[in-house]
Image (spheres, rainbow, N blue to C red):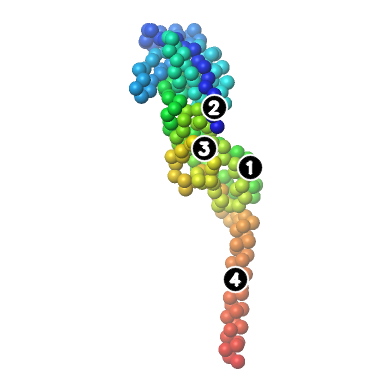
Amino acid sequence: MTSKTVKLEMKLREVMGKEVTKKLRSEGCLPVEIYGKGFENIHAQIDEKQFRKAFSSSDAGMNAVFEVSIAGKSFYTMIHDFQRDAITDKLMHIDMLNVDLNKKTTTAISVKLEGVAPAVKKGGILVHNMHSIELEALPTDMPPFISVDISGLVNFHEAIHVKDLDFGEGIIVKADPDALVCHIEGKRGLKDDATVVAADAEEADSAETPAAEGEAAAESAQ
């Protein structure tokens, strides 16, 4: 998957300070910090409505790549972090990381479970073990999230591991291949079809063993 870059127009913040930042927000703008390895930090600002529109235009979510234009310069960035008001949840500040489109970057990508597990309908409990997986890829190849189809979890104790997932070409998975992504737990005292079949087979074997031993003993007596 290759995502398109999203263009953003920003302005430099010439003056710093709490009061200046407060005034900036009251005017509908957001303070932005842009930094990166070998990149000189930039204090910027952007119209909040413009940012929200640009952000929502990409299907890459938090892994969207932005082409930022500011003070006659143009470069690529990704969102590193958001700061929100603890009470109102209003967006307060954006941290962005300068990226090279030709160099791979490492990011933790969220895991979304899709579909319905038949085992849950039988009374099983779906346990979501891994909520994000660290991937290494080119910025424009990074997926917005990892979709995991759980419709194949039919019986209790079945599981999906990292190695069971398809991440596509050009993506390096940094997680342990045997790590659990999700699994089904059975409620105590509850058995699914597979468990019942196994139990029936075990009981049948147990019943046949004494009979076989009895036959052998009768033959020896003769």
From this view, report whether residue 77 is shown above or below residue 192. above
Nearer the camera: disc 2 or disc 3 = 3
Evaluate whether residue 137 shows in this view. Answer: yes
Q: Percent from the top left, x then y, of residue 19?
A: 40, 8
- In the picture of the structure, the residue carrying the numbered disc 4 is 205
The dot on residue 35 is none
Identify the secondary structure beneath mark 1: loop
**Gap between marks 4 and 3, in whole Å?**
49 Å
**Gap between marks 4 and 1, in whole Å?**
35 Å
Upstream in sequence: badge 4 or badge 3: 3
Image quadrant in which the C terminus is located: bottom right
- In the picture of the structure, the residue carrying the numbered disc 3 is 169
Q: Residue at x 60, y 68 (%)?
A: 203
Asked if marks 1 and 3 touch (Cβ < 8 Å), the reply is: no
From this view, report whether residue 119 is shown above or below residue 140. below
Image quadrant in which the N terminus is located: top right
Hey, what amino acid is under mark 4? Asp
- In the picture of the structure, the residue carrying the numbered disc 1 is 116
